[in-house]
Image (cartoon, grey):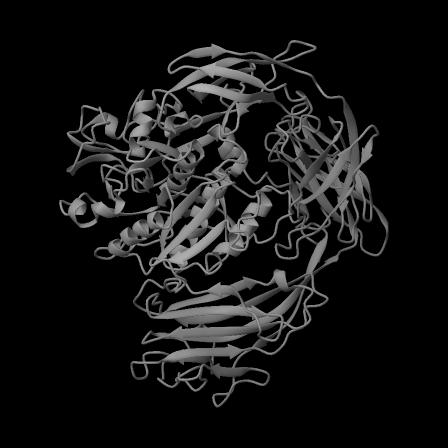
Amino acid sequence: MAPAASALSAPADAAPTRAALEPLCGSPGENEAACLALRAAGQAPMLRLAAAATPPGLGPKDIQSAYSLPADGGAGQTIAIVDAYDNPNAEADLAVYRAQYGLPPCTTANGCFKKVDQRGGTDYPQTDNSWAGEIALDLDMVSAAAPGAHILLIETDNAGLENLAAGVDRAVALGARFVSNSYGRSGDLESDLATYGAHYDHPGVAVVVASGDYRYGLQFPSTLPFVTAVGGTNLTPAPDTSRGWTESVWTRGNYGPGSGCAQFQARPEYQKDTGCTGRSVADVSAVADNVAVYHTYGSEGIGWQRYGGTSVSAPLIASVYALAGSPRPGTRPAAYPYAAGSGLNDITSGTNGPCDTDYLCTAGPGYDGPTGLGTPAGLAAFRSGPHGTLTGTVKDAATGKPVARATVGAGLDVATTDDRGVYKLDLPAGTTDSLTARAFGYTTSAPARISLSDGQSVTRNFRLDAIKRKKIRGTVEDGSGHGWPLYARVAVNGSPEAPVWTDPATGRYELSLPMGAAYTLDVTPDLPGYEPAEREVTVGNRTVTADFGLTADPDTAKAAGYTLRRDGSTETFDSATSAPQGWSVANAPGTHNGWQFDDPTQRGNGTGGSGSFAVVESDNGSIGPHQNSELISPVYDFSGAQSAELEFKTAYLYSPSNQRMSVDVTTDGGTTWETAWASSPSGGGPAERRTVHVGLRAYAGEAAVQLRFHFVADWGYFWSVDDVYVGTRNLAPVPGGLAVGTVRDRATGAGLTGATVADPRYPAAVALTVATPDDPETGDGLYTLFVATPGKATGKVTLRASAPGHADAESKAEVRRDDVVRQNFRLTPG
């Protein structure tokens, strides 16, 4: 059987909003709030990336660029996040996010990160899959906007409004002057202010609240008159505009920012809109879609994912307040943007739904409900006190040409030049020292001193000297056995300049970089199934050679020319009297009624398996110390594996308040365990039945791996498990080579996308041509086809190209094993 051919894949961000959004939290109960995080549906697990690879979705540099934020701001400030339940992976996942983007570590050990319960201690609440994702999102957004700030995570006992409000008080008591709240309850109730208002009313503290995710309509506590209510926007790259980004009201499917006029909350004196006699929502806004988040706890913790919702916007705005400096004691930071008069991007397009008062649901010039006064344009709108404006240009000293994407600033205050080299920067009134202009490939300007009075505008132009450059050359190849050249994008981490692409047939690339510095090259393969890679190079006075060998990913198993070999065993729990050989059950002292194999309640095998199964029954016993039971596997040897996996059939009822279920992994005989999977809501009613697949690549290379199915409950429900498969995954090369090239229209020379190139010997050997908009050297109509050469190193084959509205064309190609042959086609219209 011939191996299937693969077409080139689109870049990770080619269609960032295609997948539907789904809420992490369901509808809240009485006197409870729901988290407002949304995640893109249908995302594949992505737990490992090369150090300089770009995760899917917007990252810190995008957010800093869009809102003119400093790259290292936040030092000396503490930003608090208030969320319900516990995320036990919070600190570990935060470390992965920050390392991926080159942000400084933020850990308990270095004093940057602190996690407490709502009383300020370490008696953390029970875990919850839904809120765990919210916690990961909040921590990552604070890191993206304010990398230098300390982070305080408050985990409340549950999602009760009383407990969340107590969490805000605890954050302020522990010294936070910026508190983010990404949760809400629908509606505006007359009792809200009297019952909960005092907990959110802290003069001198920026208490920031998400406005909601369900389009026009109000959500408490964003309705309170002394908090900063944050709406949401769609943020889209626009390299041809002066800002480099465009924004509109965020909407996707049924989701959009909350807004409206609160009937039972008085209008704060700083709000001047005339269509609402009470408190209008929102105040300001920020991006609410397509951000990258790293999250591994629970069944939805699959690594890198795209998230959205005003849960994104709230921690970003809390962070911008922190960047702008500590609020003045006794003042209400929610009023600062209204008094500023500048420092905001006015969002003028989009709507979150129909309403009677147009501006409360439709964006337009000035204030509107969905986006408030706008999004941050630097920090001026989020600090108290007088300020002035600095404007000017940045140009090349030798040529006089504008320098685009240069940064002008001092300390936390920065602005970026547009394509004309023009910048505008709001600064505190007074004297600013050490103002500089800097740009990639140029020497930084000498420090300048600027004095501004309140409301004054001053012009200061800069001329920068270009740094001499040297060439970087290399080849990108397969590093898993075939060794053939690969088509890939080569980018320079931190550079605003466009990436280069390798030649599809040779894998060669060339670029030039300024001398006298170290750079990280980020290589992203365009052929599906390969992992990205990175390498640091130092550019001196000689040409640098940097070659890359990319690894075929054994988890996706999509690399052309490779076959997946799975080697493992399945435990079916056939004996109803005891644990299978090599397996064991361990019940914590003082508990009972643990894992059993004889179906003690005659429940039947609801997992989808057959015969006997493993089950732990929580509602089959007395109230009191109940279950803390572990079903422990034999030891597995993954020492020679490229990757590993777990698959099992399961059925259970979910009860976040009364039981916890997880699959944990140890490599040290049980001294330490790491959670690989945890249960998620079943929705009530009949038991949830599913087949669970868990990637175990993190444990490839380990010689002694054990799993445990861990059930902890006090009058919960049940958990049953069957057909547990544990095995390794390895990719093996299939004899053959690659054919690459373009398919073009013979009459016009234009590349044809959606055409097919096939090896007629094998029906499955078909590749689809794609567009290459970022690579003008190659052009559209590119294909890559794996061609099998069984039994010989070289083979002559006839390839056939087809496209709608064109006559087919055939061409003979000599395909060499473990190499690439270039074969172009021109099709005649007709």
Residue under the point 53% across and 12% down: 460
On-image quarter of the N terminus? bottom right
- From the viewer's perspective, is 128 left or right of 268? right
How many numbered marks have been drawn onto this rendered protein structure?
A: 0
Is residue 303 visible in the rendered image? The answer is no
The quadrant where residue 128 appears: bottom left
> Which residue is the extreme one toward the right?
793
Q: Nearer the viewer, residue 766 or 391?
A: 391
Q: Is 290 placed above or below 295 here?
A: above
Is residue 133 visible in the rendered image? The answer is yes
The quadrant where residue 435 appears: top right
Residue 63 on image: x %, y %: 49, 34
Q: Is 563 placed above or below 391 here?
A: below
Residue 589 on image: x %, y %: 43, 84
Residue 400 on image: x %, y %: 65, 9
Q: Nearer the viewer, residue 479 or 6?
A: 479
Q: Is 729 placed above or below 739 here?
A: below
On-image quarter of the C terminus? top right
> Which residue is the extreme one toward the bottom?
577
Q: Is 502 placed above or below 199 here?
A: above
The quadrant where residue 279 appears: top left
- From the viewer's perspective, is 390 left or right of 386? right
Residue under the point 70% across and 41% down: 784
Residue 690 on image: x %, y %: 44, 66
Q: Nearer the viewer, residue 304 or 744?
A: 304
Q: Nearer the viewer, residue 648 or 425?
A: 425
